[in-house]
Image (spheres, rainbow, N blue to C red):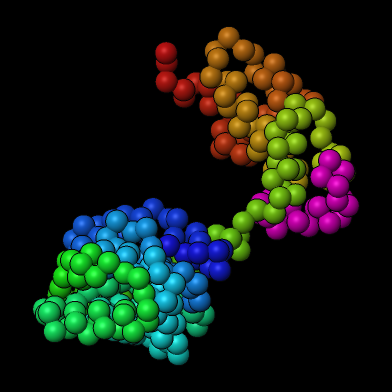
């Protein structure tokens, strides 16, 4: 998963349902871990994954071999192009990273691997064991050998097909990321959210633009411009719509007179209420009530 060096957008994607669903399905289908990692990762990216390679889990416990794993992560992420990059670690296991871009900006990688692309042999393990001993690691070689031989094995063709799938998913994630960016760009300013809450709480009173602006500590002029930009409506139209929505609910009660509804939602005259209701709803309050399904 993305760590604390990740961008806010990558954090959002790593917590998204689409990534969680894909990560789970990918692990079940391939037996391999899948991580969404930032450009610079300072810890083993697959740590804690249910599909983490048992040998890699063992290696992460010793600082020297963990440093070797982080070295692979660094190599896999340097000078990224548009395609996947695969790097083999000292133990012969392969990891692959697919760049995740939004426009021209590189925000992170989809990373998988910890697999052999050929059958592990005693001869190959002997080289791995020698490297561990050369580093002076106090490792239980019997455990290490057992974990090493339990690593996932794929043919190069199978692995390439899996990497192509991840490439397609990276494109899909980029689309989702762009949607998040667009939503953030159009996100409502906190001042407007507070103003809407104030209007909802006081919509049955005589509301002025100045009073609402004051409630959110802004000037009337600034608030007027900001409100229109954020909602697409001027202040008076917005308040009218809030009142009409409340009125529509009150009109559901056939025992409430239309004049009572008008005053209860904040209109000072029945004529004004009827005119605004027709403008917003497309019919008069009486017509609206008549068209409601009978209880």
Residue 293 found in image quarter: top left
The quadrant of the image that shows the C terminus is top left
Residue 184 horizontal/vertical position (percent): 58, 60
The residue depicted at 78 percent of the width and 57 percent of the height is 225
The residue depicted at 31 percent of the width and 79 percent of the height is 132
Tell me: 170 left or right of 6.
left
Q: Count the marks.
A: 0
Is 158 in front, or is 149?
Answer: 149
Tell me: 260 left or right of 113.
right
Q: Principal SS element in the magenta part?
A: helix
Residue 1 horizontal/vertical position (percent): 43, 62
Is 182 in front, or is 206?
Answer: 182
Placement of 246 over or under 106, stated as above or below: above
Residue 277 horizontal/vertical position (percent): 64, 33
- Residue 61 shows up from this direction: yes
Placement of 105 over or under 279, stated as above or below: below
The magenta stretch spans which residues?
214-234
Residue 110 horizontal/vertical position (percent): 37, 72
Tell me: 231 left or right of 171.
right
The residue depicted at 25 percent of the width and 79 percent of the height is 129
The residue depicted at 56 percent of the width and 37 percent of the height is 282
Is 132 in front, or is 295?
Answer: 132
């Amino acid at each position: 998963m993305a760590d604390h060096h990740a961008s806010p957008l990558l954090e959002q994607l790593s917590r998204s349902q689409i990534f969680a669903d894909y990560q789970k399905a990918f692990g079940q289908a391939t037996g391999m871990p899948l991580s969404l990692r930032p450009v610079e990762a300072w810890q083993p990216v697959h740590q804690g994954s249910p599909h983490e390679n048992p040998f890699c889990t063992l290696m992460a416990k010793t600082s020297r071999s963990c440093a070797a794993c982080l070295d692979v992560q660094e190599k896999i992420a340097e000078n990224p192009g548009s395609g996947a990059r695969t790097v083999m670690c000292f133990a012969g296991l392969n990891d692959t990273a697919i760049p995740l871009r939004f426009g021209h900006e590189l925000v992170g990688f989809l990373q998988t691997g910890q697999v052999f692309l050929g059958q592990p042999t005693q001869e190959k393990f002997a080289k791995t064991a020698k490297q561990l001993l050369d580093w002076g690691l106090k490792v239980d070689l019997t455990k290490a050998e057992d974990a090493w031989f339990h690593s996932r094995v794929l043919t190069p063709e199978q692995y390439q097909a899996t990497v192509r799938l991840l490439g397609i998913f990276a494109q899909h994630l980029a689309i989702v990321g762009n949607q998040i960016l667009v939503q953030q760009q159009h996100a409502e300013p906190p001042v407007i959210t507070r103003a809407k809450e104030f209007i909802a709480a006081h919509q049955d009173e005589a509301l002025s633009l100045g009073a609402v602006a004051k409630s959110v500590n802004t000037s009337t002029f600034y608030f007027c411009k900001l409100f229109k930009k954020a909602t697409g409506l001027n202040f008076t139209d917005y308040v009218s719509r809030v009142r009409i929505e409340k009125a529509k609910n009150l009109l559901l009660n056939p025992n409430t007179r239309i004049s009572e509804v008008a005053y209860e939602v904040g209109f000072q005259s029945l004529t004004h209420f009827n005119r605004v209701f027709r403008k917003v709803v497309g019919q008069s309050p009486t017509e609206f009530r008549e068209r409601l399904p009978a209880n």
